[in-house]
Image (cartoon, helix red, strand yellow):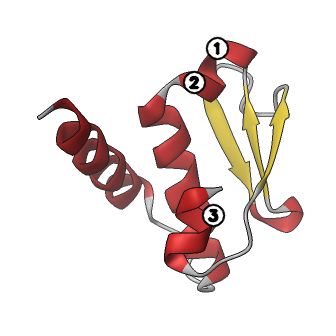
């Protein structure tokens, strides 16, 4: 994964499926498994969802996983905005 290389972290594993307690979200990052779960295969191709969950992976690799939802949104929006320009 390009982003993992850019930020110098191990790439997260990617899986299709849901996580108990998070069944209604498009994506979810599970730090203990270093895995991004996507609710369905279409979500793997949604840049915002991928970037948002990747941000959680980044923070987890830095040991700073908690309270990062707002920052994950900003990170994803920033990349999507650049792409759309």
| Mark 1 vs mark 2, CA separation in Å | 6 Å
| Mark 2 vs mark 3, CA separation in Å | 17 Å
Residue 71 point in image, percent of width and height: 34, 60
In the image, is residue 3 above or below residue 6? above
Residue name at image x 71 percent, y 32 percent: 22
Residue name at image x 27 percent, y 43 percent: 77
Tell me the residue that label 2 is attached to. Answer: 45
Left-right relation of 1 to 80: right
Residue 47 point in image, percent of width and height: 45, 33
Residue 33 point in image, percent of width and height: 88, 61
Q: Looking at the image, is mark 3 or mark 1 earlier in the sequence?
A: 1
Tell me the residue that label 1 is attached to. Answer: 42
Tell me the residue that label 3 is attached to. Answer: 57
Q: Looking at the image, is mark 2 or mark 3 earlier in the sequence?
A: 2
| Mark 3 vs mark 1, CA separation in Å | 20 Å
Residue 16 point in image, percent of width and height: 83, 27
Label 2 CA crowd tier, 10 Å (few <14, some 14–19, many 20+): few
């Amino acid at each position: 994964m390009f982003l993992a290389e850019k930020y110098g972290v191990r790439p997260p594993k990617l899986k299709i499926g849901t996580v108990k307690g998070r069944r209604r979200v498009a994506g979810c990052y599970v730090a203990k498994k270093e895995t991004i779960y996507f609710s369905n295969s279409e979500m793997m191709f949604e840049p915002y969802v991928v970037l948002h969950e990747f941000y959680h992976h980044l923070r987890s690799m830095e040991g700073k996983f908690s309270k990062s939802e707002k920052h994950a949104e900003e990170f994803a929006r920033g990349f999507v905005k650049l792409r759309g320009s």
